[in-house]
Amino acid sequence: MDLRTRPYGWRPAAVLALLPLLAACGGGHDEDGPARGAAMRIPSSDGTELVIRTDNGVRLRPADDDRVGVDERVRTDWSHRDGTWVLDLSCPGHDGGSAWADRPDGGRDGGSAGGACPRMPEVTVPAGTAVTVSARNAGIDAAGVSGALDLTTVNGDVTVDRSGARDAVVRLATRNGSVRAGGLLAARLHARTVNGDVVLGCGTAPSGVGAATTNGSVRVTVPHDAPAYRVTATTDNGGPTVSVPTTGAEAGREMTLSTVNGDVTAAAE
């Protein structure tokens, strides 16, 4: 176990349109698909990945079936190649992000389905689908989503609840915001930010954990019966605290936690 302080100088309810589209095999762009609130049935085989791209944020929720559902106020553009399905989200009839509603909860900003877009539209994801999200000017919120997760934004929080998979890699990243997760399932877990806290509550014991920030604290908790870890916990201006088992840790079972300004904690609860 490496515990050290580095010396100074280190530097509401969304309306979902469920219009079943049976996608053709192969790759390409689905130019004839519906422009708003399109739903897509995607294969459930191993290796299938859903990639969501947006200039704002997104809320991920579990789907009731094998279709990806999208808030009908949002314009959708689908494309796919092999096992990767790409969903681009934009605001219909407007350039840039000026028409996105400002409500942080992603709720409706008045009017009908043709009204202002929510800043965090809801996308429902079939069980077992690996999801990659690239967002920019708002947060990412995932709850009850089962599958590998790779969630990245720039200006916003990444919040995850009861999501992931025991055999999956989970990556959570932002730049100006915090990363917070509870009931997280992962075989390997990576989380990072620059300005914000990283707080990870694991529902299982990942074989590897990496968590880092610059201005904020890092806290990782694993179940009380988790096996031993090789822990490296470092901070410049703060204190490291490790209460997970460390004796007899197997090779490859590691936690690497770091910050510059803040505390670092690795705990079993």
Image (tube, helix red, strand yellow):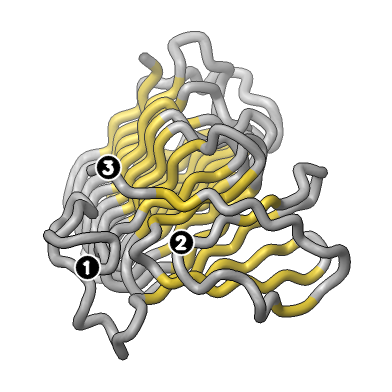
Residue 115 quadrant: bottom left
Residue 27 shows in this picture = yes
Disc number placed over residue 37 in the picture, else none = 2
Indicate left or right for 132 with 151 as reference: right
| Callout 2 secondary element | loop
Amino acid on which the number 3 mark rests in the picture: Ala
Residue 236 shows in this picture = no
Q: Where in the figure is residue 256, as x and y percent of width and height? A: 48, 45
Q: Quadrant of the C terminus?
A: top left
Q: Where in the figure is residue 229, as x and y percent of width and height? A: 55, 28
Residue 86 quadrant: bottom right
* Residue shown at 52% from the left, 40% from the top: 209
Reading the image, the residue beneath label 3 is: 13
Amino acid on which the number 2 mark rests in the picture: Gly
Q: Residues under labels 3 and 1: Cα distance? A: 14 Å
Amino acid on which the number 1 mark rests in the picture: Gly
* Residue shown at 38% from the left, 33% from the top: 161
Reading the image, the residue beneath label 1 is: 115
